[in-house]
Every structure is written in C-alpha cells, then in structure tokens.
Image (cartoon, grey):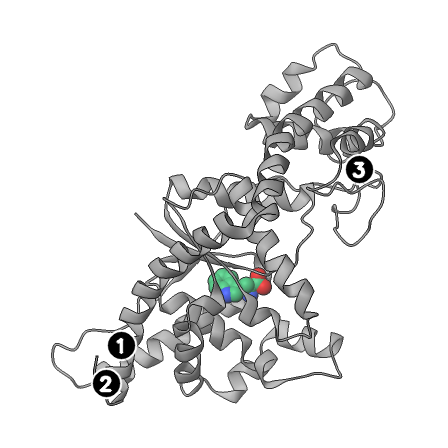
Amino acid sequence: MKKIISGIQPSGRPSLGNYLGAIKPQVSMQNEADVTYFIADLHAITVRQEPADLKRRTFEVAAWYLACGLNPEKATLFIQSHVPAHAQLGWILNTFTQMGELERMTQYKDKSKRHSSNINVGLFGYPVLQAADILLHDIDAVPVGEDQKQHIEITRDIATRFNNHYTAGKEGAKPIFVVPEAMLPKAGARVRDLQNPESKMSKSIDGKGTIFMEEDLKTIAKKIKSAVTDSGSEVIYDKENKAGVSNLLEIYAVTKGMSIENAVSDFNGKGYGDFKSAVADAVVAELEPTQARFKELMKDKTELSMILKKGADKANIQAERTLAKVMKKVGFVPPIV
Ligand code: TRP
C-alpha cells in the first residue's frame, strides 16, 4: 500500500466546506492507502498563538477527524510535538537547505507580508520542518493543493541532496530517504457560500452563507433552506447559470456519496422547495452522529488522549528508526541504550 502523509494546521472551527472538500475525502483515503495524519502544532507556532486556543484547537481537529470516521486502527493520527524526531530531523535538514532556496518560497513571502512584525526564523524554516515530517515516515506521496507544491519540491531536493551526499562514491550504500511525490488530493466538493455562490464557503465569515460543523442542526437546516437559488425552477447542474442550485447539488451528492447525475435525477420534476429540504435533511443526517461523537470526545479527553498517544507511539517507532539511521550517517556518536 502507498504510504501517504498530511499535516493539518490546528485552525479549528471547520466549515461544511472543509468537511466535504477535505476532511471527508482524507478520511476515505484510509481505505486505499497507509495514511498518517498529524496536527501540525510545531508549524502553528510560526505565527503567534494564544496558548489556550492552540491547545483547544489541537484537540478539536483530532476530534473532528475521528468523529468524521478516521479509524485509528487503520490510520495513524498524532500530534506533531509528541514525536520529537520531527524537530530533531528538522534541525539536521537545516544544514542541507540553502538560505536562497527558502527565500524563494512563496508561502514564506506571503506570510512574512501578513505577519511583518514577527518574521521569525521558524517561519523561514517552515518548509524544512515539513520536509522532516515527510521524510521520517518513508512516504511515497503527499496529497497537496497548489499552495503546497513548492514545499514538496524542496522536500524532494533536500532528500536527494542528503541521499547523494552520503552515498556518492560509496559502493553499495543505500539511500536513507524515500523521495516522495506530490499527488493530487482525492477530489471532494468545492462548496460555495450559500448566500453568495460566486465565492467559496469561507470559515472567517460568520454569516448565513457559511455552515460550521459544530453549529446547531436546526440552524444548519434553516441556512440550507434559505440558500439562494437561481431564476427558473428546474433542479439542474449548471455552474455558470445556476451557481446556487449547482452548489446545493454538489453538497447533496458528496454528502450522500453519489454522482452529480444521480443527485440530479433524484429531483426530476421537483421544485426548489423540496430540493432544499432534501439537501438539508441529507446534511443533518450526516452531521448528527458526527456532532454527537465530536462532543463525546471533547467532553472527556481521556479517550481522545489515549488515541493520540497510541498514534504517537506508532509514529515514534517509525520516526526514531529513520532518525537513528540519519544520525549514524551524519557521524553522531550513538547514545548507549
Ligand atoms: N504546510 C501544510 C499546510 O499548511 C501543513 C503541513 C505540515 C504538511 N507538515 C506537512 C502537509 C507534511 C503535508 C505534509 O497545509
């Protein structure tokens, strides 16, 4: 099975857009690949965080993934700071990364504009830590969007440089790192704002057009029922001329795990009213057990903490194995165990 990994920023309060667009497809990847997901708290502190918020959001993100069906027996889920090898390998890889390479990173350039009063060394070195995240776990492929492609490229460059440095001219020397590929993430829905389907459903706008995963189910149903639809009365999929209806169709189809064509045929001859009620019912039916599980996990953190500990235990075994090989190659004196 292919090994894949993804780091998730603990940025809390996921919307229906995050769920249908990212979380749900990421969770279903556990059936096709050997998946590792971790909450990237070390990365999060490259911009200033309120400690209590960071802590709560770290738990929340983990709880949402589990509530959405991530199976800790199949997938590995852990908190990045619970696996110290990430930071340790990051340090070593710093010495295999050039200033000039990092200066070219577009995310760094963007973020240093947005956080101009705190352009810290961690923000600059962010991609090196990301490379360590990936390389420790012998990853074949990293599902990433456009914005992260550059970080996978630099990971490949660092891995290749390290491998070459320690194998060049050495007969039979095996490369340490698997050089990972970037892969297109599994497609999810591109959920649009319910009131303004021209733009995507954001989580920063707390309005009638956004649905948050933890919102009261009645409010969610009401928001869907008052979504803007388009002129005409037929339920058809036409993103250009019927952006509102098409958005609801996509929400319905991905929620129910069906194709758009089948979703459309469910509403043959039906009006917008019935259509919107059906979409609301589908979303509520999906979120009801998810919310219940989320609340249960958040109420008493014992189970959640145990799951995260088991994930970290698994990840630590793999990460320490790679780190030990790296340290040996570099020439560090191994500690006596
Ligand atoms: N940089 C990624 C993001 O902002 C998060 C991340 C950290 C990550 N480490 C990773 C993603 C390793 C994939 C693999 O979304």
What residue did someone put label 1 on?
324
- Kindly check if marks 2 and 1 are in contact, taking CB atoms under 8 A apart as contact: yes
What residue did someone put label 3 on?
194
Q: Tag 3's secondary structure?
A: loop
The alpha-carbon separation of the residues under discs 2 and 1 comes to 8 Å
* Earlier sequence position, callout 3 versus callout 1: 3
What residue did someone put label 2 on?
334
Number of other residues with Cα within 10 Å of mark 2, as a class: few under 14, some 14 to 19, many 20 or more: few
Number of other residues with Cα within 10 Å of mark 3, as a class: few under 14, some 14 to 19, many 20 or more: many
The alpha-carbon separation of the residues under discs 3 and 1 comes to 51 Å
Residue 241 in picture, x, y percent from top left: 80, 32
Q: Residue furthest left?
A: 171
Residue type for callout 3:
Leu
For residue 25, above or below residue 283:
below
Direction from residue 319 to residue 262 in the image, left or right: right
Residue 121 in picture, x, y percent from top left: 59, 85
